[in-house]
Image (tube, rainbow, N blue to C red):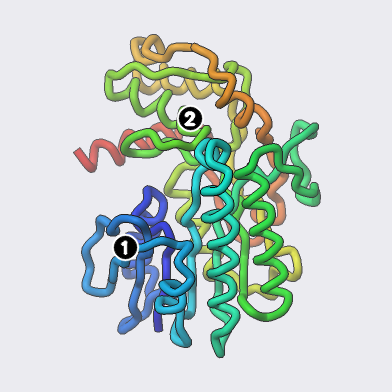
Amino acid sequence: MKLLVTGGAGFLGSRLIESLLQPDARDLLPPGARLLSLDLSPCPLRDPRLASVVGDIADRDLLSRLVGPDTALVFHLAAVVSAQAEQDFDLGMAVNLDATRALLEVCRHQARAPRLVFASSLAVFGGELPRQVPEELAPLPQSSYGTQKAMAELLVADYSRRGFVDGRVCRLPTIAVRQGRPNAAASSFASGIIREPLAGLPSNCPVPLDTRLWLSSPGKVIDNLLLAARLDGVRLGPRRALNLPGISVSVGQMLDSLERLGGPGTRGLVGEEPDARVAAIVCGWPGDFEVERAMRLGFVRDSDFDAIVRAYQNEASARA
């Protein structure tokens, strides 16, 4: 038996792999099973059950070698992030759409359809939105990244309908607070305005303080990806896409949490210099969702943003 995680060297992928290697994930990675990471760089984790493959997700031949009749589960996390996909249209299409189609095609030709968990994004929504996005709202992306994710979602749904894969689409909230360095995502500031001030470093908020974000801690996102992998596809039916639970919070409220938990000096380290490029992407994303369906299926969320900041502080202390 074999599991594959694309994007396994990234922030989220390496955390997912770490969780899959824990004893309480033996139902997903039983004794004797192999776990493969595919990314442009090696996965930072070391374990005899883990093989780190360095390569391009867009390489169809490589995918054909990694996915075989013994592949039971695929987590597809590899992606070109939002701002980068907007700047480089061809790269975004090649990775976010074409490589996803190639992966689905390789899965299609297996004797037994693998279960596939696809990490999508709330960026599939856009345009004029209600204050709270209802679960039945059709995607209307306003960025190349969101469009690529929406097209990939439809492919996962149709390949599942045809029985080529047993897919489930997880539309991830913005993840905060991320450990490590900023990335090229338009939403990167959502971690930066907390992470850097808590380390005594300046940061900048590029969007208005009343901008509402749909957020989840990294830990809750990992919990939900694992739950999606365990979920019986029959319970999803033809609606394979799920809006994962999060919390709705304004940027101003995030900074209030920073000040409460990090001290008054931390908020003063956050500047408010607008960035029209970032705002044009982020301010078009919905800031609140109905998630009753996901909650009924057992998915989880953080209690509030203070809890998210505390979780980050505790992890940062443990890693220090």
Name the amino acid type tagged 2. Answer: Ala
As shown in the figure, which amino acid type bears the numbered disc 1? Val
**In the shown orientation, is residue 180 left or right of residue 215?**
left
Residue in the picture at 50% in, 43% down? 81
Residue lying at the far front in this picture: please name it. 90
Q: What element does badge 2 sit on?
A: helix
> What is the x, y in percent for residue 307?
45, 35
State the residue lying farthest toward the left.
320
Horizontal and vertical percent position of residue 197:
34, 20
Q: Nearer the viewer, residue 246 or 272?
A: 272
Badge 2: residue crowd in 10 Å (few <14, some 14–19, many ≥20)? many
Q: Quadrant of residue 15?
A: bottom left
Q: Quadrant of residue 285?
A: top right
| Foreground label between 2 and 1 | 1
Q: Earlier in the sequence, mark 2 or mark 1?
A: 1
Above or below for 58 versus 1: above
- Residue that mark 2 sits on: 190
Q: Which residue: 30% across, 55% down?
A: 41
Query: Which residue is nearer to you in this view: 110 or 62?
Result: 62
Q: What crowding class fits label 1: few (fewer than 14 Cα within 10 Å), some (14-19), or many (20 or more)? A: some
From where the camera sits, is residue 178 visible? yes
C-alpha separation, residue under disc 2 versus residue under disc 1: 29 Å
Q: Which mark is residue 113?
A: none
Position of residue 193 relative to residue 220, above or below, is above
Residue drawn 62% across the image and 75% down it = 166
Residue 259 is drawn in which quadrant?
A: top left
Q: Which labelled disc corresponds to residue 54?
A: 1
